[in-house]
Amino acid sequence: MLDAIVPLISLIALEVILGIDNIIFISILADKLPDHQRNKLRFWGIGLAMVMRLSLLAFISWILKLDQTLFTAFEINFSGKSLILILGGLFLLYKSTKEIYHKSEMKNQENVTDIKTASFKRLLAEVILLDLVFSVDSIITAVGMVQELWVMYTAVIVTVIIMLFASKPISDFIKNHPSFKILALCFLMMIGVSLLAEGMQFKIPKGYIYFSMAFAFLVDVIQMRTVRHTTNAGK
């Protein structure tokens, strides 16, 4: 039992880090909805992510087959996992670049337009699509770290509970600081590139990605505090 504690904590930490991408994506989509539907989208999005991951664990033998080569093209071996990651990466790149364009080039338009045109079902479908991509990647990563199924199940449940509690503060922070919204979208673009590269068998170490994200976040915080201090000093 004690031998499984360290792998369990390590897996929970890894799953939480991977889950940040999911929370950021859901938070940005939820911002398109009226206030009374935002929490609902976060709850359903994260809840369905848990159901999806637990269901995939039940079919763990099938999940492992996704790593088997289906065909080879341009000297690259493509598996079921590769195709899912490539499609997920392309989708994430498309959504993040579209949102960045919308925020930067169409900022003068009424925010009400977003609320009127955004459909809860459509946004939930987009969340489910990305949940699937992150879930497959998460489960295969978990299998590579631990062997006991109960450890994987426990890690998934604990991670989702943490995500549920963390989703609203993260969402509120992104909403209240527009500059961080663009930064968050750039993070998603980076994750999309990472998924695309991994699907093409070019693996970018996740530590590099999350370190660069943390550094960019720190720079933005320092810049925001500097601007605020300068503004207050000038009054």
Image (cartoon, rainbow, N blue to C red):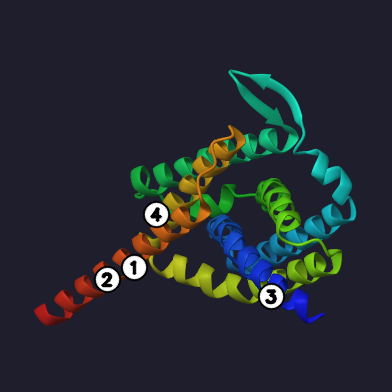
Which residue type carries mark 2?
Ile
> Callout 4: helix, strand or loop?
helix
In this picture, is 8 found above or below 189? below
Residue 121 in view, yes or no:
no
Say the numbered circle drawn on residue 218. 1
Q: Nearer the viewer, residue 123 or 20?
A: 20
Q: Are marks 2 and 1 in contact (CB under 8 Å)?
A: yes
Q: Position of residue 7 (x, y in %)?
A: 70, 70
Residue 214 shown left or right of residue 160 in the figure: left
Which quarter shows the C terminus?
Answer: bottom left
User: Label 3, on which residue?
Assistant: 6
- Mark 3 vs mark 2: give the one in front: 3
User: Label 2, on which residue?
Assistant: 222
> Callout 3: helix, strand or loop?
helix
- Looking at this rendering, what residue extends furthest in the left direction? 234
Residue 189 shown left or right of residue 74 in the figure: left
Q: Nearer the viewer, residue 124 or 92?
A: 92
How far apart, in angstroms, are the residues tagged by discs 1 and 3? Answer: 29 Å
Q: Are marks 4 and 2 in contact (CB under 8 Å)?
A: no
Q: Position of residue 207 (x, y in %)?
A: 49, 57
Which residue is found at the position 44% from the left and 54% from the top?
A: 208
How far apart, in angstroms, are the residues tagged by discs 3 and 2? Answer: 35 Å
Categorize mark 3 by other alpha carbons within 10 Å: few (<14), some (14-19), many (20+): few
Q: In the rendered structure, which disc, 1 or 3, sits on the residue that comes first in sequence?
A: 3
Which residue is found at the position 19% from the left and 78% from the top?
A: 229
Q: In the rendered structure, which disc, 3 or 2, sits on the residue that comes first in sequence?
A: 3
Q: Are marks 1 and 4 in contact (CB under 8 Å)?
A: no
